[in-house]
Amino acid sequence: MATYTEEENRPDEVDNFKPIFKKYKRRDRPLDTSDVIDFDNGNNLHKVEEFKLEEPDHLLTGLKPVKKWKAYCLKSNPGFLFIVNPFENGYQRYWVSRCVKDYPCRPNVRNLDAYMDVGDINIWNSSMDTYKDDITNKECVMMKLRWVTMGYHYHWGTKKYYKDSKAPFQEDMSSLGRYVASAIGYPKFSPEAAVLNYYHLDSSLSGHTDHSEFDHSAPLISFSFGQDAIFLIGGETKETEPSAVFLRSGDICVMSSSARLSYHAVPRIMESSSERNHACFDISGISKLDTESSSSHSCESTLDKKIVERIHSDNWDFMSKYLGQTRINFNIRQVLEPNREFPAES
Ligand SMILES: O=C(O)CCC(=O)C(=O)O
């Protein structure tokens, strides 16, 4: 089942993207991952080189200090950056919780709004109430949630943003986006729109470019949580054969400079087989007292407290059942050029 439709090919364009997309999507033969860049298992690392990060002047709760991050760029498209899970163990629970409980609430826009009246109910709470031990039932509203937009809403039909179509951009996601942007050399990055994608094990996302933002000099920063994915990154036309890379829970990828307008796709979601997911969501090392210690080394103390409290109060058994069948991605975009308004016609 495709999550979205594929963008049309340009006339006369040789398409070297689609065959690779199909190779990883098809389920009628064993999956060959021998060409996939895999940072956990060290496969195909000759295709990447280390990327030097910049140390921001503060820490952000839930992330390791930047000097401990491992970041790479793709040799064939150096604007594509990959940061191997920089989250401290357990802290990804916070982001998963926000993505399932809060970000799908109004005034954010959901795919569901087009065909069912979910109104102002909290989709997660009502799914928990109705489906109790069966959250992954296909009839459950939560399993029908495919995307959420926030900040300036991306309009799928017109592929545009509109000046008056926007919801507040959540402060915690904004801090996270700005922090990662600083580390990769974009200290002035301004998060203005986010697309959240909820994939299940049979989902895929066809080849496309994200070109609707007005400022392509700003990076697009993309986070993965839950099940694994194979991600394809190509070039500005489909003629470029894409490279494949595994994205696992906590990984961040960035499309910047030469890769900002590159074709990309998610042909495959796979059950996470790595040891990593166990550690990612293990909160045994996070004491409730961390609220105090973390605020002393960070300038974002209100957020610190909120994160630690949330991690300890959630019904994680329920959430992890949902996440066992789901990959959540959010990607953060700057829409406007700095100090610029929307063009008049928007
Ligand atoms: O799920 C991903 O990693 C990519 C999402 C994406 O390409 C998009 O939302 O435009």
Image (cartoon, rainbow, N blue to C red):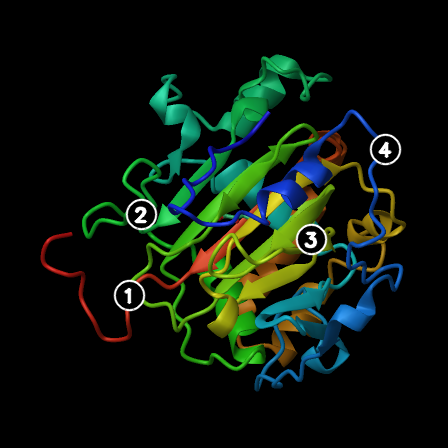
- Amino acid marked by disc 3: Gln
For image coordinates 33% across by 59% down, the residue present is 213
**Residue corresponding to mark 2:** 167
**Residue corresponding to mark 1:** 336
- Amino acid marked by disc 2: Ala
- Nearest to the eye among marks 1 and 2: give it: 1
Quick one: label 1, few (<14), some, or many (20+) residues within 10 Å? some
Indicate the position of residue 104 as horizontal and vertical percent values: 46, 36
Q: Which of the marked residues, 3 or 2, is nearer the chain's N terminus?
A: 3
Q: Which of the marked residues, 3 or 1, is nearer the chain's N terminus?
A: 3
Indicate the position of residue 231 as horizontal and vertical percent values: 65, 50
At numbered mark 1, what does the secondary structure look like: helix, strand or loop?
loop
Cα–Cα span, label 4 and label 1? 44 Å
- Nearest to the eye among marks 4 and 2: give it: 4
Quick one: label 3, few (<14), some, or many (20+) residues within 10 Å? many
Depth order, front residue of 178/205: 205
For image coordinates 36% across by 25% down, the residue present is 113
- Nearest to the eye among marks 3 and 1: give it: 1
The dot on residue 30 is: 4
**Residue corresponding to mark 3:** 92
Q: Which of the marked residues, 3 or 4, is nearer the chain's N terminus?
A: 4
Quick one: label 4, few (<14), some, or many (20+) residues within 10 Å? few
Cα–Cα span, label 3 and label 2? 24 Å
Q: In this view, does 255 lie above or below 197?
A: below
- Amino acid marked by disc 1: Leu
CB of mark 4 near ligand 1 (< 8 Å): no
Indicate the position of residue 79 as horizontal and vertical percent values: 55, 72
Indicate the position of residue 207 as horizontal and vertical percent values: 52, 45
- Nearest to the eye among marks 3 and 4: give it: 4
